[in-house]
Image (tube, helix red, strand yellow):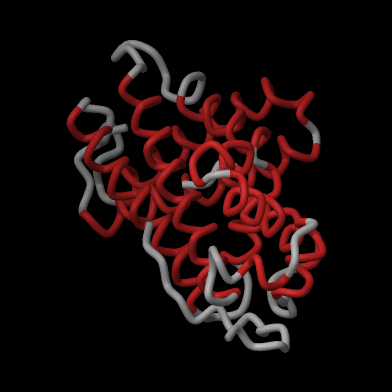
Amino acid sequence: MPPSEPIRATRSTEVEGPAAASSFQRKYGQGRGKLLEAAARLVAREGSARLTLRDLASEAGMSQNAIYRHFRNVDEMFASLIEDFSLRLRDGLQQARSRVPLNEPLSRTVVGWLLDFALSNKDVFVVAVRERYGPVGPARRAIEQITHDIMADMRRDLGAAGRLPPLPDDKLDLALRVIVQQTFELCLACIEMPERREKLLAEAELIFAWCMTGAAAVSGHPGAA
């Protein structure tokens, strides 16, 4: 029998791994998808520290017992939310990078896709960014793993396309980390003010150029970027 008391979230499940809230129901079915959509809304609005299955049931318009058909506890639900976000995010970014002609800048296509993804999935995007800067724990480590995975994807894809300067690994990793973090900040800005989309794309292009140029300069390769 499921416990009668709501289970407090400890976020003990670590996930390495994309979420589009609008597609939850198509991917997981109406019940599970409805719960993930409700979880994204609730955590974006109130945070995850005090989230209970009772809160989730109320937000989703379902009985608490019905939740146990899909998730054993809040940790499992939260892990599914982060895992789906990571998979969809990385897959979309990789596809966007593959569509950019070699003689064109990345930002128009890649960051443009990312801004649209953030606008289409506001709640789960806000949740992911908030957890990245939250208390140290499994959820934060899961989001940090997403950052690491995106950096690895960029290193592989952009390196293969000849878009990266010849930098030491530590300098390149730092530049890529700054680019990812700053681009996520641009996504939050776009969620708040979508009318600034074109200006944010221009900023993204500058951020990439500045990070690569700066990393090249301090590495003794001023012309590499």
Answer above or below: position of 101 versus 66. Answer: above
In percent of width and height, residue 180 lies at 47, 47
- The count of marks equals 0
| Residue drawn at (32%, 11%) of the image | 103
Q: Nearer the viewer, residue 23 or 215?
A: 23
| 216 sits to left or right of 161 | right
| Residue 203 visible in the picture | no
Which quadrant: the C terminus? Answer: top left
Answer above or below: position of 195 versus 28. Answer: above
| Residue drawn at (36%, 57%) of the image | 148
Answer above or below: position of 150 versus 14. Answer: above
Q: Nearer the viewer, residue 30 or 73?
A: 30
In percent of width and height, residue 78 lies at 56, 66
Q: Nearer the viewer, residue 142 or 156?
A: 142
Which quadrant: the N terminus? Answer: bottom right
Q: Nearer the viewer, residue 113 or 20?
A: 20
| Residue 143 visible in the picture | yes
| Residue drawn at (75%, 60%) of the image | 62
| Residue drawn at (67%, 72%) of the image | 65
Q: Quadrant of residue 191?
A: top right
